[in-house]
Image: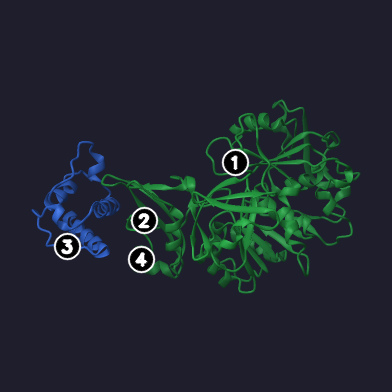
């Protein structure tokens, strides 16, 4: 499974657990519009770290948190595994 | 104090009590006639009035030495086997140690201790000693990272709960414990065996669990104690089959409903009880109704000289069974001005029953909110296919920290980990606030348990 598909799958799993109605996850959807709160994102980042072995937001000191779903996925794709 | 009022361990070991033993994996010692035998060399005669460190490899010699010098030495300091050697000098200074009893005398030749007495087996014939004084029993606290604190007890205080319960009915009990008898929880069991007219089967840290249980079975153990972590490990091991104790006791950690139910199922003919005790506060109470927590009626000016109250969520105990002081130059006060020990164990009142929620010092901080890992574990452990779990915090770039849980499944559960994970999360969401629900659940084969038998909490 590609990095992007794994991220989408993890988001759907967490949305189901948190009872969040997830809109279609297009690249330009703002993360704010996903309905995820900070706890949901914290869960997502922790699970992706276990799944993909990387946490792009902790590795880089000057990392800024992405604004859109596309930015979020690219943050993982751009980190050398 | 007149000699008649002095009582020591030897006074419970009259020759009229036949058939009593103390044993470990290698030796079996008859307690009948033990008072005219000795495990100590000639230095034995010089121990009167000394402050004695017991530094022994194993528990059997430690127990025999306790019997010999209680009522003779001024003090005895019990060293658990995992004591960090770097801390010895500070402890020797603080306790004013001027004699050591050891099975490794070569390690003590250059330590500046005036008297080194060697302990070994077999026992040799010796003239019986008379109790001269009430020896002070010094024990070490566990679970702190620095030099452990020295806690001062008397035999009277240590045995308060045992005397209050009275002698056990029926055939004399054969006691065993997963604890080391040089810790408070284990010492209570050793004293129960000696004072209560029973026998004692000691554990051996080098022995595999299955072999240990086989030995407990072979020696006819009827009464046995350990921490919930000890018991969970036993239930997981599958070694419990065929072992039929009459009394199963838990102490030292929170006994949640899952482990109480698991033990009731594994030992249908046993009475299962959980006790509250700490090295400082002594034995508070024992609960035998099979339910987690304890009745609110125990709070207040209670029975047998144990008084309890809850202040700022933590259990406070004033008791004749409590230690009388921390010992040492920079020792802090053990009790508040009114004589209460703050146990640091946090409790919550629900429907006329108090439930332990965790240690004050074990709180993890999740996004600025305080969380007791134990309350999360108690929910996870309710799942029928969970044997043991540990909740802890993990750093998060989003919220600062999140809760994660490591979980050990039963053999039956191992095949459907994904479903069980979802079920655990659903249970947690029903029972816990959202920030306490684990973000990640990992299934693991083992969880570390400290030498004191408690779940290791590295982040606490």
Of badges 4 and 3, the one in the foreground is 4
| Location of residue B250 (image quadrant) | bottom right
- Same chain assignment for discs 4 and 1: yes
- Residue found at the far bottom of this picture: B268
Residue at the spot of label 2: B436
Dot 1 falls on which chain? B
Quadrant in which the C terminus of chain B is drawn: top left
Query: Residue B235 or B290: which is nearer the viewer?
Result: B290
Report, in whole angstroms, how far the alpha carbon at label 3 lies from the one at label 1: 55 Å
* Rendering colour mode: by chain
What is the secondary structure assignment of the residue under circle 4?
helix
Disc 4 to disc 2, C-alpha distance = 11 Å
Percent position (x, y) of residue B319? 67, 49
Q: Name the residue under label 3.
A: A22
Residue picked out by circle 1 = B336
| Mark 4 and mark 3: Cα distance apart in space | 22 Å
Residue in the image at 22% along x and 44% along y: A56
Who's green, chain-wise? B
Residue B31, given in percent of the width and then of the height, sits at 82, 55
Pick out the residue farthest to the right.
B127
Q: How far apart are marks 4 and 1 (CA)?
A: 39 Å
- Residue displayed at 62% across by 33% down: B331
Label 2 – label 1 distance at C-alpha: 33 Å
Label 3: element kind: loop
Q: Are marks 4 and 2 on the same chain?
A: yes
Give the foreground label among 2 and 3.
Answer: 2
């Amino acid at each position: 499974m590609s990095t992007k598909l794994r991220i989408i799958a993890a988001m759907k799993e967490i949305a189901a657990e948190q009872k969040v109605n997830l809109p279609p996850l297009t690249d330009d959807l703002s993360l704010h519009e996903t309905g995820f709160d900070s706890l949901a994102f914290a869960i997502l980042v922790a699970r992706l770290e276990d799944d993909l072995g990387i946490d792009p937001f902790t590795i880089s000191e000057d990392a800024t948190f992405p604004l859109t779903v596309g930015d979020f996925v690219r943050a993982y794709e751009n980190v050398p595994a | 104090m007149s000699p008649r009022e002095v009582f020591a361990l030897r006074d419970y070991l009259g020759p009229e009590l036949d058939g009593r033993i103390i044993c470990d994996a290698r030796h079996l010692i008859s307690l009948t006639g033990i008072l005219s035998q000795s495990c100590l060399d000639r230095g034995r005669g010089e121990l009167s009035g000394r402050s004695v460190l017991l530094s022994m490899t194993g528990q059997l010699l430690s127990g025999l030495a306790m019997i010999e010098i209680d009522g003779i030495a001024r003090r005895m300091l019990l060293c658990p086997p995992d004591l960090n050697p770097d801390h010895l000098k500070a402890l020797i200074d603080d306790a004013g140690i001027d004699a050591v009893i050891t099975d490794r005398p070569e390690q003590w030749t250059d330590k500046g201790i005036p008297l080194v007495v060697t302990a070994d087996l077999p026992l040799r014939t010796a003239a019986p000693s008379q109790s001269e004084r009430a020896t002070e029993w010094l024990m070490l606290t566990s679970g702190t990272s620095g030099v452990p604190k020295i806690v001062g007890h008397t035999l009277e205080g240590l045995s308060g709960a045992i005397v209050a319960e009275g002698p056990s009915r029926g055939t004399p009990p054969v006691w065993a414990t997963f604890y080391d008898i040089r810790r408070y929880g284990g010492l209570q069991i050793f004293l129960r065996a000696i004072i209560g007219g029973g026998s004692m089967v000691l554990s051996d840290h080098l022995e595999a669990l299955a072999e240990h249980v086989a030995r407990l079975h072979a020696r006819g153990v009827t009464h046995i104690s350990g921490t919930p972590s000890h018991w969970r490990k036993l239930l997981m091991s599958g070694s419990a089959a065929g072992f039929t104790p009459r009394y199963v006791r838990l102490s030292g950690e929170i006994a949640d409903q899952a482990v109480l139910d698991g033990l009731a199922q594994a030992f249908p003919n046993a009475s299962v009880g959980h006790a509250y005790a700490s090295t400082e506060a002594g034995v508070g109470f024992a609960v035998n109704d099979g339910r987690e927590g304890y009745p609110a009626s125990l709070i207040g000016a209670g029975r047998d000289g144990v008084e309890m109250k809850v202040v700022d969520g933590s259990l406070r105990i004033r008791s004749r069974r409590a230690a009388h002081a921390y010992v040492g130059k920079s020792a802090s006060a053990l009790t508040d001005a009114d004589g209460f020990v703050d146990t640091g164990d946090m409790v919550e009142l629900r429907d006329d029953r108090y439930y332990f929620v965790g240690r004050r010092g074990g709180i993890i901080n999740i996004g600025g909110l305080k969380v007791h890992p134990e309350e999360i574990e108690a929910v996870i452990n309710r799942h029928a296919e969970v044997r043991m779990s540990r909740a802890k915090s993990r750093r998060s770039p989003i919220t600062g920290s999140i809760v994660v849980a490591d979980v050990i499944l039963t053999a039956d559960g191992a095949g459907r980990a994904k479903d069980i994970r979802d079920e655990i999360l659903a249970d947690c969401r029903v029972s816990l606030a959202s920030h306490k629900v684990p973000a990640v659940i990992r299934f693991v084969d083992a969880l570390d348990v400290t030498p004191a038998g408690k779940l290791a909490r590295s982040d606490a």
